[in-house]
């Protein structure tokens, strides 16, 4: 990602005595921040006083974790840096889950946290926590500013680090005395990052050998991850796939990088990926991994992953390469540049047998569910949403079955359309993520496809959506269970549903009490009408779909098995 | 296999915690870690001895390089290097044993740095194997205390004579 720092704004180069808080706000504006999220508190009062009349759209969540997910989804939906502010101690601690979520999924974010006065640090002062210590493993970088002279530079560096290379969250801890002290801010402090290097341009020789391998391959597969979306490289990916005629499978975070309506799309791979993607990976002779990291949910048993394939791995993070699997042709660099160069060097090939085989698999093992069921199947709800939004909605999810079904049954066509916590698997992500995405894209239809228990975790943020008139839609696939846990308990723990069933509240009543629209759908026939009504709503809208309680996600690669050893294929075949 | 990794890092707070935290979080084992200033006040050098196969050590190197305040990482494996440890050791030394111990110190080119009625404190530096050997030789007299630095290392500047260099002493 290129950094888009704007150096023109008021402060640069001018000399004026400013407080630390003013320097922070001016630097945020200079960095192009138009929207930020945050929650106030004791030690951030000076900063919030300066934000009172700053030209920044500010969203206050009901809990800092929610705000952190909002900033994260804002970044994922827009490609800009998401900004979250929290106070010291509990405020900062409440960011940890959100930062870890963004870290695992490489999302560009800057977190600003208040800190107690410098002379109190280490004294167990009121609302003191060792924020940089606590957040170090869940940020790309963090630092504490103890001298106002370093303030503007540190914030600038935070934006640069967050948004370049393999992006990630960066936290800056700000003691309150720095925010209130004054400094003659002749603001020319340049970034000082001697240890930070980005390898954007791929090695020409490596790119050439990758192109040669592609041209020689009879059964290639492109395996693309979130890195392609982060790098804004979907266009180049599509050029390469079409020009060289290569089927494309996507990770959960890669969804949207390739148009899933096209015949080359193998949809998602991995534990709950499509059988045709998993078979294609296991039988390919060349695997071209782009912006993906061979996660265990993708590879299954690593020793038997893509056993016949030569592997090309394109990634901007050198430490991703050969971390989990040995790679034959590593290319370190920006996916956009490298895919663009590859597209120039490859030749079209029919690969008739390969695509014929893939078409057969696609036909035989399409994602299916029982359409004749009298109950509401969760997959049906998602298909109906996909149909009525003509594949164009921005979808956020909770974590678990709801997330997997959304990934399987909504067919995405554009990047940044699917926003989900992949690496960390953070339940409760869906609702705040929908808010963040809606703030980033006010005109888009933003739908949170959620589970009942994921929704339970952060549903307080509905109040935030109502306050800001955000027309988000929340579709709760309500089965009463923590569905994915229940599925594992059914399959691997003899149906002992230990602590995975909870009594849910009346979501329709909660929605209404919070000032949103609430609906409950109990009959299958009512689904299309409810979806239509929901899409027409201008207010935040929560629809409680009472779905089949014990539906399972198929296919499934059990943990520790090879990708080709999927369970549930017989079920899919029976449903043809 | 033992690898000596040398990392030039920015001299600022939190860097050691970041490096140590990364090793712990990713399950890499540190055999020793030495941090010290360099000729440049903005930079420190960390010398880290890691035991692991090539793939593990490659990850260690890459993960270290990824840490923002880490400026440069080198793995000295297969290179001619000078590697040294420093040790202070307090050995029981009653008068009748002193000549023997002083002879031992002479052989190891060690130094007496403190002396009392019953003990002497000795400073030894050298490759790790020499330090280990010296400790073993002192055992029969009774060791009261040992403080060791861990390894610091630098590649040899003149690489003309590879044979000499390979013997990394």
Image: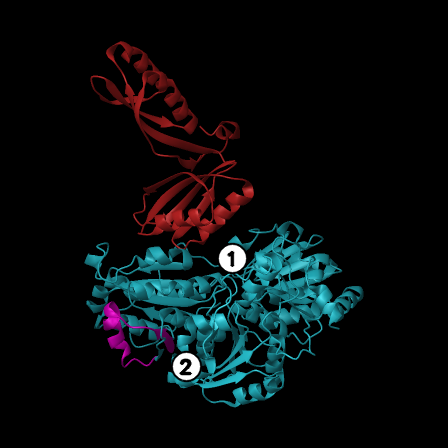
The mark closer to the camera, 1 or 2, is 2
Which stretch appears magenta?
A33-56
Question: Residue A97: image x %, image y %?
Answer: 41, 63
Q: In this view, does A258 lie to the left or right of A431?
A: right
How crowded pointer 1 is (Cα within 10 Å; few <14, some 14-19, many 20+) is rated as many
Chain bearing tag 1 is A
Under tag 2, what secondary structure? helix
Which residue is at a point 45% across and 62% down the rendered structure image? A103
Q: Give B56 or B6, whichever is nearer the viewer.
A: B56
Which residue is at a point 21% across and 71% down the rendered structure image? A19
Q: Earlier in the sequence, mark 1 or mark 2?
A: 1
Q: Residue A317 carries which label?
A: 1
Compared with A543, A226 (above or below) is above
Under tag 1, what secondary structure? loop
Q: Look at the image and give the colour of chain B.
A: red
Proximity of marks 1 and 2: CB atoms separated by less than 8 Å: no
How crowded pointer 2 is (Cα within 10 Å; few <14, some 14-19, many 20+) is rated as many
Compared with A144, A429 (above or below) is below
Residue farthest top in this picture: B96
Visual colour scheme: by chain
Q: Is residue A220 visible in the rendered structure shown here?
A: yes
Which residue is at a point 51% across and 64% down the rendered structure image? A500
Question: Residue B158: image x %, image y %?
Answer: 46, 34
CA separation in Å, label 1 and label 2:
36 Å
Q: Give A61 or A1, whichever is nearer the viewer.
A: A61
Chain bearing tag 2 is A
The quadrant in which the C terminus of chain A is found is bottom right
Which residue is at a point 59% across and 64% down the rendered structure image? A487
Residue on which the image places disc 2:
A465
Q: In this view, does A278 lie to the left or right of B73?
A: right
Q: Give A218 or B93, whichever is nearer the viewer.
A: B93
């Amino acid at each position: 990602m290129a950094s888009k720092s704007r150096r023109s704004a008021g402060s640069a180069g001018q000399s004026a005595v400013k407080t630390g808080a003013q320097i922070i706000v001016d630097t945020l504006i200079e960095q192009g921040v138009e929207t930020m999220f945050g929650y106030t508190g004791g030690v951030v009062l000076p900063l919030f006083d300066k934000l009172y009349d700053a030209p920044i759209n500010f969203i206050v969540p009901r809990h800092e974790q929610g705000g952190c997910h909002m900033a994260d989804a804002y970044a994922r939906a827009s490609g800009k840096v998401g900004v979250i502010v929290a106070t010291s101690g509990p405020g900062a601690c409440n960011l940890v889950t959100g930062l870890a979520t963004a870290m695992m999924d490489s999302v560009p974010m800057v977190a600003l946290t208040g800190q107690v006065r410098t002379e109190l640090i280490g004294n167990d002062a009121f609302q003191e926590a060792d924020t940089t210590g606590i957040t170090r493993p869940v940020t790309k970088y963090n630092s504490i500013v103890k001298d106002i002279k370093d303030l503007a530079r540190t914030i600038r560096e935070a934006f640069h680090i967050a948004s370049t290379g393999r992006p990630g969250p960066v936290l800056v801890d700000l003691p309150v005395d720095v925010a209130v002290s004054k400094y003659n801010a002749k603001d020319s402090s340049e970034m000082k990052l001697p240890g930070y290097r980005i390898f954007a341009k791929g090695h020409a020789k490596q790119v050439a050998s990758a192109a040669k391998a592609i041209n020689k391959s009879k059964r290639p597969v492109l395996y693309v991850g979130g890195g392609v979306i982060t790098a804004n490289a979907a266009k180049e990916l599509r050029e390469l796939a079409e020009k060289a005629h290569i089927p494309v499978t996507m990770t959960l975070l890669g969804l949207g990088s390739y148009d899933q309506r096209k015949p080359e799309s193998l949809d998602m791979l991995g534990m709950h990926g499509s059988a045709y993607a998993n078979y294609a990976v296991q039988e390919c002779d060349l695997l071209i991994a782009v912006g993906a990291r061979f996660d265990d949910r993708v590879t299954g048993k690593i020793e038997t992953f893509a056993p016949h394939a030569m592997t090309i791995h394109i990634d901007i993070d050198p430490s991703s390469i050969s971390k989990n699997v040995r790679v034959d042709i590593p290319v370190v660099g920006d996916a956009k540049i490298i895919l663009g160069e590859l597209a120039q060097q490859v030749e079209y090939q029919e690969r008739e047998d390969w695509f014929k085989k893939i078409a057969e698999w696609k036909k035989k093992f399409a994602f299916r569910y029982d359409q004749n069921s009298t109950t509401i199947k969760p997959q049906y709800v998602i298909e109906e949403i996909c149909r009525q939004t003509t594949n164009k909605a921005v979808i956020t999810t909770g974590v678990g079955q709801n997330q997997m079904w959304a990934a399987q049954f909504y067919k995405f066509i554009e990047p940044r359309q699917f926003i989900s916590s992949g690496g960390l698997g953070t339940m409760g992500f869906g609702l705040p993520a929908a808010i963040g995405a809606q703030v980033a894209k006010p005109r888009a239809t933003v739908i949170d496809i959620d589970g009942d228990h994921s929704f339970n975790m952060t549903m307080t943020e509905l109040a935030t959506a109502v306050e800001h008139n955000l027309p988000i839609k929340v579709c709760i696939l309500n089965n009463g269970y923590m569905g994915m846990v229940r599925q594992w308990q059914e399959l691997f723990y003899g149906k002992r549903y230990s602590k995975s069933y909870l009594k849910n509240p009346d979501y329709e009543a909660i929605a209404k009490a919070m000032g949103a629209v609430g609906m409950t759908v109990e009959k299958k026939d009512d689904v299309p009408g409810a979806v239509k009504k929901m899409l027409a709503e201008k207010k935040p809208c929560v629809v409680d779909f009472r779905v089949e309680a014990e539906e399972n996600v198929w296919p499934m690669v059990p943990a520790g098995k090879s990708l080709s050893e999927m369970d549930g294929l017989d079920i899919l075949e029976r449903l043809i | 296999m033992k690898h000596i990794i040398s990392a030039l890092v920015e001299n600022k707070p939190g860097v050691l915690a970041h490096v140590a935290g990364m090793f712990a979080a990713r399950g890499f084992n540190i055999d020793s870690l030495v941090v010290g200033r360099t000729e440049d006040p903005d930079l420190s050098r960390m010398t880290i001895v890691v035991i692991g196969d090539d793939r593990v050590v490659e990850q260690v190197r890459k993960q270290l390089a990824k840490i923002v305040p880490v400026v440069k990482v080198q793995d000295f494996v297969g290179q001619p290097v000078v590697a040294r440890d420093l040790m202070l050791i307090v050995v029981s030394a009653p008068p009748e044993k002193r000549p023997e111990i002083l002879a031992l110190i002479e052989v190891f080119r060690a130094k007496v740095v403190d002396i009392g009625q019953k003990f002497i404190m000795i400073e030894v530096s050298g490759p790790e194997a020499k330090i280990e050997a010296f400790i073993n030789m002192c055992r029969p007299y009774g060791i009261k205390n040992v403080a060791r630095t861990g390894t610091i290392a630098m590649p040899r500047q003149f690489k003309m004579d590879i044979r000499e260099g390979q013997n990394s002493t």
